Each structure stands twice: as structure tokens, then as C-alpha cells.
Amino acid sequence: MECGFIAGGTTANKKYLVTGAAGFIGFHTTKRLLARGDTVVGYDNLVPYYPVEYKHARLKQLVGPPGFTFQRADLNESHFVGCNRE
Ligand SMILES: NC(=O)c1ccc[n+]([C@@H]2O[C@H](COP(=O)([O-])OP(=O)(O)OC[C@H]3O[C@@H](n4cnc5c(N)ncnc54)[C@H](O)[C@@H]3O)[C@@H](O)[C@H]2O)c1
């Protein structure tokens, strides 16, 4: 996975991993990336820090058009991130 700058116009058509994709910042970041033609894999564990309905409503806007896939996952799981957390 390569890195790119969202504000730039020359880095489209890349694949991004967005953590907290159902959250406020992750949602808007994902929307912007998809709008310019990038592919996004969004991860979120939908923690109920505030009403989860907000998160489901955001995900509903992202799922459908091609380019976005969602994984409900906790990034604190060491097997998920595949690294040694000592
Ligand atoms: N919103 C702002 O104005 C603002 C400003 C400065 C800093 N921040 C920081 O940016 C970050 C995101 O802010 P936000 O407003 O989008 O918050 P948010 O709570 O709306 O979104 C965070 C998302 O991350 C998910 N999440 C939390 N822990 C997770 C885990 N272990 N695995 C997977 N997903 C997990 C939550 O379910 C949530 O949907 C926060 O750390 C916040 O403190 C936000």
C-alpha cells in the first residue's frame, strides 16, 4: 500500500487503509478519497463511545458504490496488526 496526499490531485487511484472509518474524521477522509477515485479499505470496531447509530449511518453512505470495503475489527488485536506489541 502506497502513501499519498489527499489534498493533491496527482495521487488518485491508490488503495488506502483508513482506520476509524466509521468515525467523524475517518468517514470524511474516506468520502474524499472515494470521490477522487481511490480505493479504501475501512477498519472500525464501532466502539459505543457515542451512539453507534451515527457510525452505521456514515457507513451506509460509504457502502454501495465500488471502491469501499469495510471490516469490523479492533486494531488493538495483535494478531490483526500482525506485529509484536511488547
Ligand atoms: N474530530 C475532531 O475535531 C478532532 C480534532 C483533533 C483530534 N481528533 C482525534 O482524531 C481521532 C478521530 O477523531 P474522530 O472525531 O473521528 O473520532 P470518532 O470517535 O468519531 O472516530 C474514531 C473511530 O475509531 C473507531 N475506533 C476506536 N478504537 C478503535 C479500535 N481499537 N479499532 C478499530 N476502530 C477503533 C471508533 O469506533 C470510531 O468510529 C481521535 O483520536 C480524536 O481525538 C479529532
Image (cartoon, rainbow, N blue to C red):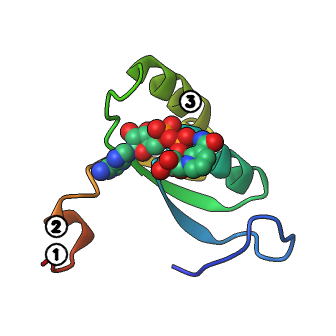
Foreground label between 3 and 2: 2
The residue at 50%/22% (across/down) is 54
Which residue does the numbered mark 1 point to in the structure image?
85
The image quarter in which residue 13 lies: bottom right
Residue 17 as seen in the image, left or right of residue 84 = right
Categorize mark 3 by other alpha carbons within 10 Å: few (<14), some (14-19), many (20+): some
Compared to residue 1, the image places residue 32 above or below, namely above
Foreground pick, 42 / 78? 78
Residue 5 as seen in the image, left or right of residue 73 = right
The residue at 69%/52% (across/down) is 34
Which residue does the numbered mark 3 point to in the structure image?
58
Compared to residue 11, the image places residue 73 above or below, namely above
The image quarter in which residue 19 lies: bottom left
The residue at 16%/75% (across/down) is 85
Foreground label between 2 and 1: 1
Categorize mark 1 by other alpha carbons within 10 Å: few (<14), some (14-19), many (20+): few
> What SS does tag 3 mark?
helix
Foreground pick, 58 / 69? 58
> What SS does tag 1 mark?
loop
Q: Earlier in the sequence, mark 1 or mark 3?
A: 3
Foreground label between 1 and 3: 1
Task: Say which amino acid is labelled 1.
Answer: Arg
Quadrant location of the C terminus in the rendered image: bottom left
Q: Earlier in the sequence, mark 3 or mark 2?
A: 3
Which residue does the numbered mark 2 point to in the structure image?
78
The residue at 73%/50% (across/down) is 32
Ligand 1 under 8 Å from disc 2 Cβ: no
